[in-house]
Image (cartoon, grey):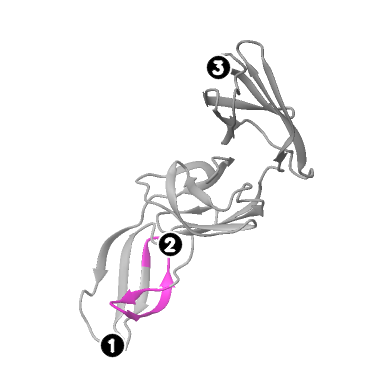
Amino acid sequence: IVTLSGQQLLGGGSWAESVTFGEVNCTVQFGNDTQIRCQLDGSVPAGSPSTTVDVLVRADSGALLVEEDAFELLPTGVVSAVVPSIGQAGTLVTIFGERLLLGSHALASVRVAGVAAAIVGATERNVTVSLGWRASAAVGDIVLTAESGAFIRVADAFRYVPPASVSSIAPGLGQAGTLVTISGSGLLAASTVAAVRFGAAEGAVLTAGNDSIVVRSPS
């Protein structure tokens, strides 16, 4: 989203009929004689260098305002990999690529399959997020939105699996070294078990599957 500020921007007209940055259209959201706000509909193709372009404002009166070499169009961001590309709530997902901040200082939001994810870290080359809760399985887009309003969408880039469910823990009591079986569904979240904790202490995982995990209680 770009804001143009100045005087007599509409040249006696009442509305900005079009705003273009070089050959790229900018959809007008608001406009008067001193300020016009619009959202860029494109950018420089990936792999091309940035380019400085003229800004043209055409009012409904026919008046044309031209500001030469006023804006630098940057190449679009590119996503090269999503790791892992399958998981559920709480999964840490890293998005790899180039120019992932989209010409801004930071990302405003990341959505995965329609669900807001918590941004853990973000640079131009990788973005790590913690997935939010989703009640059902789904395949969906990943959308990165910068503070500037610029965004990049990767279609069908992630698959949510059904939320994990624990049906039983047997035995339900014991002492150090007890073998405990945790039964349920979706326990691995399409991944592996990183740790099983009994309070603050970590047990030793002996076997792990989607339906059951056997762990030795800590000493």
SS at circle 1? loop
Q: Amino acid at mark 3?
A: Trp
Q: Are marks 1 and 3 in contact (CB under 8 Å)?
A: no
Q: Specify the quadrant that holds the N terminus.
A: top right
Q: Amino acid at mark 1?
A: Ala
Which residue carries the number 3 mark? 15
Residue 188 is labelled as: 2
SS at circle 3? loop
Quarter of the view holding residue 122: bottom right
Residue 176 is labelled as: 1
Q: Is residue 160 above or below residue 183?
A: above
Instruction: Tell me: 42 left or right of 188.
Output: right
Point 41% across, 61% down: residue: 210
Instruction: Tell me: 213 left or right of 52.
Output: left
Q: Which is nearer the eye, 136 or 47? A: 47
Q: Is residue 108 above or below residue 194?
A: above
The residues colored magenta run 195-212
